[in-house]
Image (cartoon, rainbow, N blue to C red):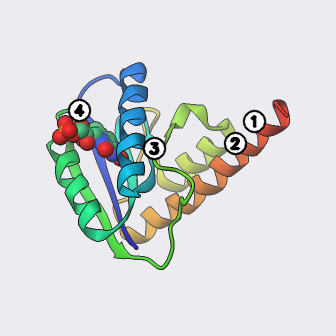
Amino acid sequence: MYTLIYKSTHSGDIDWSALQAMLAKSRKHNQLKQITGMLLVTKREFFQLLEGEEETIEALYERIQQDPRHTEIVTLSRQTTPTRFFPDWYMRGVGIFDMSPEFTQMLYKTYGQDHGALTLPTTEEASYQLIEQLKLELFAMDERQRQQNP
Ligand SMILES: Cc1cc2nc3c(=O)[nH]c(=O)nc-3n(C[C@H](O)[C@H](O)[C@H](O)COP(=O)(O)O)c2cc1C
């Protein structure tokens, strides 16, 4: 398994419905190519983890880098990993404002913020730490959802 993490800056104000459409299209494509992962959307940036076969991931990353919807793309990690972080999600998208206030406060404290925009990690180690935290929070969010709508 090959895992790639990058961050980038939105090109303009986020259009949430366009983003949902982009995610739906991505999920179809990713399923076909057995790519899984997640995309965090903050006030200013994207933070994405892609996992799958090395060639498939690099080919997708090539396309993503050409995408005019973002700029200032920074690769944070390329690694061979024993297992998938997100085996069940072809591309789970989450907005920072969809998460619990406690969780986002914890992120702002850990990573810093600038005018309400989370400062994303710049190192591989911190990127994986953030991924672990997001994974736990997403599972907790899904669990809360299940309890509200059994
Ligand atoms: C932040 C961001 C994340 C993206 N993630 C994916 C993804 O996981 N899978 C995917 O197929 N396309 C993703 N895309 C869209 C691709 O950049 C591209 O538009 C899409 O693969 C269609 O490519 P094509 O126009 O060459 O067919 C993403 C775009 C952005 C801006």
Separation of marks 1 and 3 at Cα, in angstroms:
19 Å
Q: Quadrant of residue 21?
A: top left
Q: Earlier in the sequence, mark 3 or mark 2?
A: 3
Residue matched to label 2: 141
Residue matched to label 3: 40
Q: Quadrant of residue 35?
A: bottom left
Separation of marks 2 and 1 at Cα, in angstroms:
6 Å
Separation of marks 3 and 2 at Cα, in angstroms:
14 Å
Q: Earlier in the sequence, mark 4 or mark 3?
A: 3
129 vs 59, nearest the viewer:
59
Q: Is residue 2 above or below residue 39?
A: below
The residue lying at 32 percent from left, 22 percent from top is 13
Tell whether circle 4 marks a residue whose Cβ is less than 8 angstroms from ligand 1.
Answer: yes
Do the residues bearing badges 2 and 1 touch, measured as CB atoms within 8 Å? Answer: yes
Do the residues bearing badges 4 and 2 touch, measured as CB atoms within 8 Å? Answer: no
**Please, what secondary structure does the residue beneath circle 4 have?**
loop
Q: Earlier in the sequence, mark 4 or mark 1?
A: 4
Residue matched to label 1: 145
List x then y, in percent, for residue 37. 45, 54
Q: Is residue 135 left or right of residue 62?
A: right
How many numbered discs, if any? 4
Residue matched to label 4: 69
Tell whether circle 2 marks a residue whose Cβ is less than 8 angstroms from ligand 1.
Answer: no
